[in-house]
Amino acid sequence: MTLNKVYYSGGEEIRDLTIVGGGPTGIFAAFQCGMNNITCRIIESMPQLGGQLAALYPEKHIYDVAGFPEVPAAGLVDSLWKQAERYHPEVVLGEAVARYRKLDDGSFETTTVSGKVYISRALLLAAGLGAFTPRTLPQLGDVSHLEGSSIFYSVRNVSDFAGKKVVIVGGGDSALDWTVGLLHAAERVTLVHRMHEFQGHGKTAREVEEARENGAIGVYMDSEVSSIETVEGVLKRVALSKKNGSVVELEADRLLILIGFKSNLGPLAEWDLELADNALVVDSHMKTSIDGLYAAGDIAWYPGKLKIIQTGLSDAAMAVRHSLTYIRPGEKIRHTFSSVKMAKKKRNEQ
């Protein structure tokens, strides 16, 4: 897999479409560009493609993407890239986009924080929720010296928790998923949630309840982590404060805090585009308030928007398809089914 380096570097060459964001939506948009015979580049601020799936949840399993009954996040990213790479999209990694400028001829100049400039005939924003940082537990004070060794905000490697006493904080999908996911790897898993019921998916919540009833895990509801105890920079205990006023102390080697992320659109919020619910308003063609500038995935807002991976993939297909009328004005756009297109391509290669 060539996801951690520039796959193809065209530099100053003009592309039909610049895609800002290399998560699932951005990668699938690149595939759609190939299917529609237009050139593209992806600009991604992280050192690898995949967005949050690669950066935060590579080993998390996903169950709601069509055609995949169950797939690891990293595996989904791999599959999306294999689909797109046959068209050799240019990929620029480790570059955050700072601003754009619409030129007199209708094309777009995109400038990164480092000062590099890329030109394209249209622009697609697929930057997810923008920059994101994990929510922390402020009552613990400065725990930066423990982060990555005893305190974690995501699971990058299950091996970090193997054979350990793990306390997980949260009640949403990620917390429930990893309570079940670490069950057989960790020595002991304890879930702590400040509310009286879970907010995650019902199926996973039932699995957690069953594990609790079987004595396989510990669960503390209406409870919060109030303090931690360390010895020579290593986590030893976690103290819980319950709503009834009692305090419980748990032995712990790892504290996994999964209470969500704070998102920030960053420079995108200053681009003079219409916003709603901290996202960019788009029409039925995924176009923003600027002609030639489109948005797809979590960064795009329209009535009834459902923020799941599947919707982002659909948004990407819509955005690329409708961008053709801007990239090739006056040209009649013909739809070709993928099976027909690929069959023709294979015949030509023989």
Image: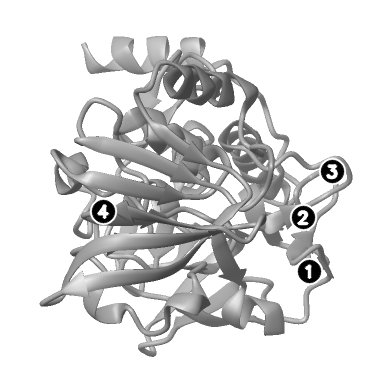
Percent of width and height locating residue 16: 52, 56
> Mark 4 and mark 1 in contact (Cβ < 8 Å)?
no
Specify the amino acid type for callout 3: Ser
Q: Residues within 10 Å of mark 1 (few under 14, many from 20)?
A: few
Which label lies toward us, 1 or 4? 4
Which label lies toward us, 3 or 4? 4
Q: Which label belongs to residue 68? A: none
> In the image, 8: left or right of 40?
left
Specify the amino acid type for callout 1: Ile
Q: Residue furthest bottom?
A: 115
Identify the residue at horizontal 78%, vertical 74% (top origin).
273
Q: Which residue is mark 3?
A: 284
Q: Which residue is mark 2?
A: 287
Specify the amino acid type for callout 4: Ala
Q: Residues within 10 Å of mark 3 (few under 14, many from 20)?
A: few
Report, in whole angstroms, how far the alpha carbon at label 2 lies from the one at label 3: 7 Å
Sequence-earlier tag: 3 or 1: 3
Report, in whole angstroms, how far the alpha carbon at label 3 lies from the one at label 4: 50 Å
Q: Residues within 10 Å of mark 4 (few under 14, many from 20)?
A: many
Which image quarter holds the C terminus? top left
Percent of width and height locating residue 74: 30, 38
Specify the amino acid type for callout 2: Lys
Q: Which residue is mark 1?
A: 290
Which image quarter holds the N terminus? top left
Name the element at disc 4. loop
Q: Which label belongs to residue 252? A: 4
